[in-house]
């Protein structure tokens, strides 16, 4: 029997133990899945803007991607938008990406008590659940599912929904019939910014549709650490 619990926001990341699943649907960990799909060599999540620039000095050819409050950071190559990266994906292929965000990457750097860290979003939630079912008990690890929310400080419907979905899949529970309607209704909550004509520069509508897909990617991104800091490792999963 897998021992799992759902935690929330920055405090949740700090409390996470065992196998920690850090969730950010809009848009950090959806984007990181797409980055690998677009041919990125390696993605390196970092906590601060200063760390991102310092790492860029060590990896001059790296691509800088990042946001604060959803807005692309000054001097960075891209914001946190999968559709905008897709439009210029030839710039990603074969290169290292340095990635910093307001919520998702903060969860990684603050999950200091976890034994193993995975990132997750709706686009690879099924793969994450399969990986956990295959590995958590075998490794003797409890599972901490962390919904990072809006800037890691306020609940976000999409992250809460993803956490509940993964937890249900882990325990092979029937997915509630309300799940699909709740997924579609995300546009009424934090997702509504993607439909505001005045915000399309930073929150393109296409991002919303790319991020609420389920089962899009049959792999997980597991966090490792080396002399340069954190990196995400793509691991294919049997579905």
Image (cartoon, rainbow, N blue to C red):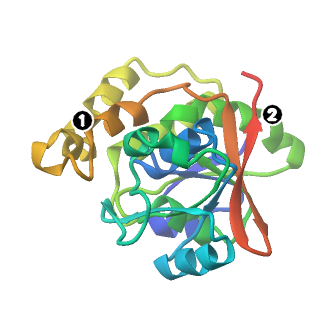
Residue 165: where, in percent of width, then height?
51, 33
| Residues at marks 1 and 2, CA–CA distance in whole angstroms | 33 Å
Residue occupied by mark 1:
187
Residue at 68% of width from left, 77% of height from top? Answer: 58
Does label 1 or label 2 sit earlier along the sequence? Answer: 2
**Looking at the image, which is closer to me, 4 or 230?**
230
On the rendered image, what quadrant is the N terminus found in? top right
The label on residue 134 is: 2
- 173, 27: nearer the viewer: 27
Quick one: 28 or 2, which is closer to the camera?
A: 28
The quarter in which the C terminus is drawn is top right
Is residue 15 in sight in this rendering? no
Q: Specify the farthest residue to the left.
A: 198
Q: Residue at x 31, y 22 (%)?
A: 181
Query: For this rendering, which residue is in front, 23 or 139?
Result: 23
Q: Secondary structure at mark 1?
A: helix
Near mark 1 (Cα within 10 A), the count class, few <14, some 14-19 or many ≥20, is some
Q: Is residue 227 left or right of residue 195?
A: right
1 vs 2, front mark:
1
The answer to whether the residues at label 1 and label 2 have Cβ atoms under 8 Å apart is no
Residue 166 location in percent, x, y? 57, 36
């Amino acid at each position: 029997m897998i021992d799992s619990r759902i935690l929330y926001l920055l405090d949740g990341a700090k409390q996470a133990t065992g196998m920690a699943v850090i969730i950010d649907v809009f848009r950090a960990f959806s984007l990181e899945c797409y980055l690998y799909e677009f041919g990125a060599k390696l993605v390196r999540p970092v906590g601060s803007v200063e760390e991102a620039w310092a790492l860029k000095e060590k990896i001059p050819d790296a691509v800088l991607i990042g946001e604060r409050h959803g807005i692309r950071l000054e001097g960075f190559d891209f914001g946190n938008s999968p559709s905008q990266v897709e439009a210029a994906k030839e710039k990603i292929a074969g290169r290292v990406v340095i990635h910093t965000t307001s919520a998702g990457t903060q969860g990684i750097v603050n999950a200091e008590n976890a034994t193993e860290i995975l990132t997750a979003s709706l686009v690879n939630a099924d793969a994450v659940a399969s990986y956990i079912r295959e590995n958590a008990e075998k490794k003797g690890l409890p599972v901490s599912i962390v919904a990072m929310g809006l800037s890691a400080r306020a609940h976000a419907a999409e992250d809460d929904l993803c956490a509940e979905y993964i937890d249900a899949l882990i325990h092979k529970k029937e997915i509630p019939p309300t799940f699909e309607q709740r997924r579609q209704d995300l546009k009424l909550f934090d997702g509504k910014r993607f439909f505001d004509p005045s915000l399309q520069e930073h929150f393109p509508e296409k991002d919303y549709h790319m991020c609420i897909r389920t089962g899009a990617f049959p792999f997980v991104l597991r966090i490792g650490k080396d002399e340069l800091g954190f990196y995400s490792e793509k691991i294919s999963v049997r579905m």
